[in-house]
Image (tube, rainbow, N blue to C red):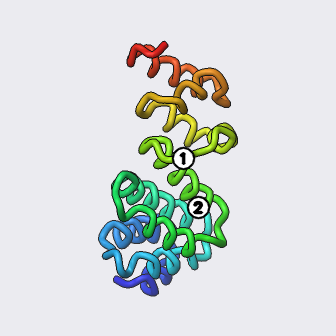
């Protein structure tokens, strides 16, 4: 079944499952095109949710490797008209920088979403976790960071 056939199905639950299946099996050379096509679905909430799951799965697999930057740039171009998806990709890049000890800015971390702050607070200990233990946006983020520091003997 191709994307055109999927778009013909009136049931958004069926389309969502079909999109996830197609995205899960896509080869790298077709990924940008498929993401762009999924985002043409008239039910934008469902389409963006399917693409978000795909981006999170792929970023989880790629963020620590050498192919991440090229992939993130291509996905950013494919999602540029979808603010939430573009923001998520930006935050994956910030998470990558923090995790791999690449340059990053404290204000970017503090301005990031609860999703990224919580993911970072639970991740490898370091300067970012210390910052979030004190200044994380929510009590849950601050507690997660403090518990992480305590577990690592850094607090």
Mark 1 or mark 2: which comes first in sequence? 2
Q: Secondary structure at mark 1?
A: loop
Image quadrant containing the N terminus: bottom left
For the residue carrying disc 1, how many other residues have a C-alpha within 10 Å: few (<14), some (14-19), or many (20+)? few
Instruction: State the image coordinates of residue 3 (x, y, percent, origin top left).
Output: 43, 82
Nearer to us in this view, 19 or 140: 140
Q: Which residue is mark 2?
A: 85
Nearer to us in this view, 105 or 145: 105
Nearer to us in this view, 110 or 119: 110
Instruction: State the image coordinates of residue 54 (x, y, percent, origin top left).
Output: 43, 61
- Tell me: residue 54, above or below residue 140: below
Q: Which residue is mark 1?
A: 103
- Tell me: residue 83, above or below residue 153: below
Residue at horizontal 50%, vertical 80%?
Answer: 37
Numbered disc total? 2
- Tell me: residue 14, above or below residue 110: below
Residue at horizontal 42%, vertical 70%?
Answer: 19
Q: Label 1 to label 2, Cα distance in Å?
A: 23 Å
- Tell me: residue 111, above or below residue 136: below
Instruction: State the image coordinates of residue 14 (x, y, percent, origin top left).
Output: 43, 68
């Amino acid at each position: 079944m191709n994307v055109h056939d999927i778009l013909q199905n009136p049931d958004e639950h069926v389309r969502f499952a079909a999109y996830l299946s197609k995205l899960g099996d896509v080869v790298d050379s077709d990924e940008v095109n498929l993401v762009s096509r999924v985002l043409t679905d008239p039910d934008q909430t469902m389409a963006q949710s399917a693409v978000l799951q795909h981006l999170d799965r792929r970023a989880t697999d790629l963020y620590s490797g050498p192919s991440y930057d090229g992939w993130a740039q291509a996905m950013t171009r494919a999602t540029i008209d979808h603010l939430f998806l573009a923001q998520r990709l930006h935050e994956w890049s910030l998470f990558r920088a923090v995790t791999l000890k690449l340059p990053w800015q404290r204000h970017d971390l503090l301005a990031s979403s609860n999703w990224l702050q919580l993911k970072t607070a639970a991740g490898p200990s370091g300067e970012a976790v210390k910052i979030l233990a004190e200044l994380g946006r929510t009590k849950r983020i601050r507690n997660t960071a403090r518990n992480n520091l305590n577990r690592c003997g850094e607090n």
